[in-house]
Image (cartoon, coloured by chain):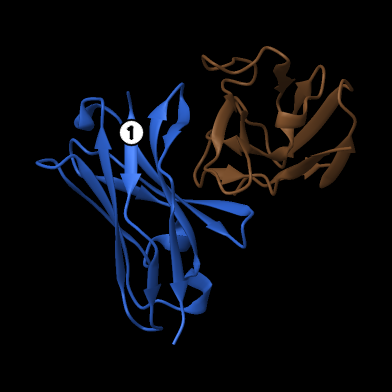
Chain colours: A brown, B blue
């Protein structure tokens, strides 16, 4: 099983600041996927194929990485970005999620 | 538009079973895989399994292989997750999701299952 380790676990950021979240895989994966989950809501796909944005996702979000190291960046934090962020690998069974990073607004 | 509507909150006794539904609309039901995901304690996410609605075949996370059953009803465009012999460890929110963008793209609203006597 591929274990995904996210860091930091929790982060508090001021509006306008740049945010970078990390996801490390225990084995190499082909792509990484990122989800945003707000309180009381279902997860929402934020990034697919490591760096692509589904329609409707603001372009302040970006993804990068390869092999075992991936990151999600928010170029300028907004209040509405406060949420839990999860990474997901679909390279090998079982598909696995990271344990999440809780991003708070200061 | 794509919509996945899940059944409502379930309160069930230990040892009982539960069958959750996921009614889809807005797309050809048999063209896209359906995935089921468990979220425990409001945070950790686990993939339970994947279901091909066209063939009815499923792939499972080994952890859930002897725990969950995935089925579909093509006449109503509905997918089902059945969990027998419930324990407190099964208390969680269960999501159905549809494939898209090479990932789990469209999500139902989730069904909260509480196992309690």
| Residue occupied by mark 1 | B3
Q: As displayed, is residue A21 above or below residue A100?
A: above
* Left or right of A4, for residue B112: left
Q: Position of residue A13 (x, y in %)?
A: 88, 33
Neighbor class of circle 1 (other Cα within 10 Å; few <14, some 14-19, many 20+) is some
**What residue is drawn where x is 58% and y is 36%?**
A89
**What residue is drawn where x is 21% and y is 45%?**
B78
Please identify the quarter of the rendering in which residue B35 is found: top left
* Left or right of A100, for residue B12: left
Q: As displayed, is residue A92 above or below residue B68?
A: above
Q: Position of residue A54 (x, y in %)?
A: 53, 17
Q: Quadrant of the C terminus of chain A?
A: top right
Please identify the quarter of the rendering in which residue A50 is found: top right
Please identify the quarter of the rendering in which residue A75 is found: top right
**What residue is drawn where x is 38% and y is 82%?**
B13
Q: Position of residue A77 (x, y in %)?
A: 81, 24
The residue furthest left is B75
* Left or right of B56, for residue A50: right
User: Do we see residue A68 in this rendering?
Assistant: no
Q: Nearer the viewer, residue B109 or B60?
A: B109
Q: Position of residue B66 (x, y in %)?
A: 36, 67
**SS class, disc 1:** strand
User: Do we see residue B45 in this rendering?
Assistant: yes
Disc 1: host chain: B
**How many numbered discs?**
1
């Amino acid at each position: 099983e591929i274990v995904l380790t996210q860091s930091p676990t929790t982060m508090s950021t001021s509006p306008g600041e740049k945010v970078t979240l990390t996801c490390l895989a225990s084995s190499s994966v082909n792509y990484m996927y990122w989800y945003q989950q707000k309180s009381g809501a279902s997860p929402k796909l934020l990034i697919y194929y490591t760096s692509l944005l589904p329609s409707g996702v603001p372009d302040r979000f970006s993804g990068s990485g390869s092999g075992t190291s991936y990151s999600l960046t928010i170029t300028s934090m907004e209040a509405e970005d406060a949420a839990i962020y999860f990474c997901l690998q679909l390279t090998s069974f079982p598909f696995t999620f990271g344990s999440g990073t809780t991003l708070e607004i200061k | 538009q794509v919509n996945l509507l899940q059944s409502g909150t379930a309160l069930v006794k230990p040892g009982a079973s539960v069958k959750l539904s996921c009614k889809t609309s807005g797309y050809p039901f048999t063209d896209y895989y359906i995935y089921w995901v468990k979220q425990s304690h409001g945070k950790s996410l686990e993939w339970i399994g994947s279901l091909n609605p066209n063939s009815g075949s499923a792939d499972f996370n080994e952890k859930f292989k002897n725990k969950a059953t995935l089925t579909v009803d093509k006449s109503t465009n509905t997918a089902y997750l059945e969990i027998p012999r419930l324990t407190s460890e099964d208390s969680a929110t269960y999501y159905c999701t549809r494939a898209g963008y090479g990932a789990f793209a469209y999500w139902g609203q989730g069904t909260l299952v509480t196992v309690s006597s």
